[in-house]
Amino acid sequence: MADSWTREFQETARLAEDIEGRIAEKNELPPHSSEGIRIVSVTRRKLAMLNNKMDRLESLLQSARLDEKEMARRQSMLVDIRYKGKQMSASLSSAQANRNSLMEGGIAPVETSRTKGMDNSGLVNLQRQIMKEQDQDLENLEHTVLSTKHIALAVNEELDLHTRLLDDMDQSADVTNNKLLAAQRRLGFLNKNLGQGWSLMTMIFLMIVVVVLVLFLFKLL
């Protein structure tokens, strides 16, 4: 029982730290921003979870068999975290008040067609319904943002693929260009060798002609 209580208290303490971080994040945002409203909604649900966990810890502690010193220590720990939870709940009071003042026109309450004829219980139910609709709108917005993110990732992957294809084409073009240059060099070398060969044959032919003419003239003499 003692180990179970300690583990659950540690989980509760981590949940309290998470809530405290979300409240700090919300305080850094501009008033009435959509992100701030979303954080308030999530934090409110986490505060409800925190209260449930603290109630369970208190129930486990009442049924635990501990000495007076350990019992007092754990009761003190539970009191501290309950006090911290109340402080965090109070820090959301301004945001909660903004969401709960759904029938206010800035300063004074204004009667609308939806609130006409409602008692306090009806107004509370209406407020809860509107808050639920706002939470649903926030969830839809989150889904839209996630869908947009997935589309952006797909487009980015497509661009990466095209970039790789263009790089491969550039490499292929470089290889082809190098092959053409090598072929041009070989053709030039062949042309040069052929030119030198024709010149040598021409000289040999002329020498033969000269020798024949000399022999012919020598016979005539």
Image (tube, helix red, strand yellow):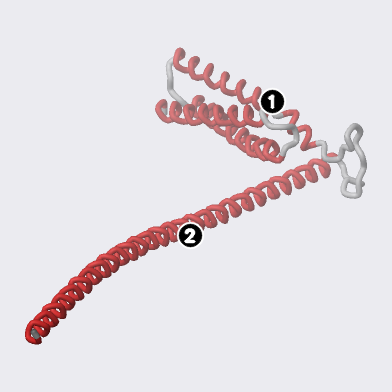
Q: Is the residue 148 above or below the residue 41 in the image?
A: below
Looking at the image, residue 131 lies above or below residue 211: above
In this rendered view, identify the residue nearer to me: 213 or 192.
213
Find residue 121 and report its horizontal and vertical position in percent: 81, 41
Percent across and percent down for residue 181 are: 33, 62
| Quadrant in which residue 83 is drawn | top right
Asked if residue 100 is positioned above or below residue 115 in the image, the reply reads: above
Secondary structure type for disc 1 = helix
Viewer-closest of 28 and 6: 28
Q: How far apart are marks 2 and 1 (CA)?
A: 52 Å
Mark closest to the chain's N terminus, 2 or 1:
1
**Location of residue 154 in the rendering, given as x and y in whole percent from the top left corner:** 52, 57
- Report which residue position mark 1 lands on: 91
Kindly give the residue lying farthest to the top in the view shown.
69
Residue visible at 52% across and 27% down in the picture:
13
In the picture, the disc for residue 162 is 2
- The residue nearer to you, when weighing 186 against 141, is 186
The three-letter code of the residue at mark 1 reads: Ser
Q: Which of 97 and 195 is in front in this view?
A: 195
Asked whether, in this view, residue 185 is left or right of residue 113, the answer is left
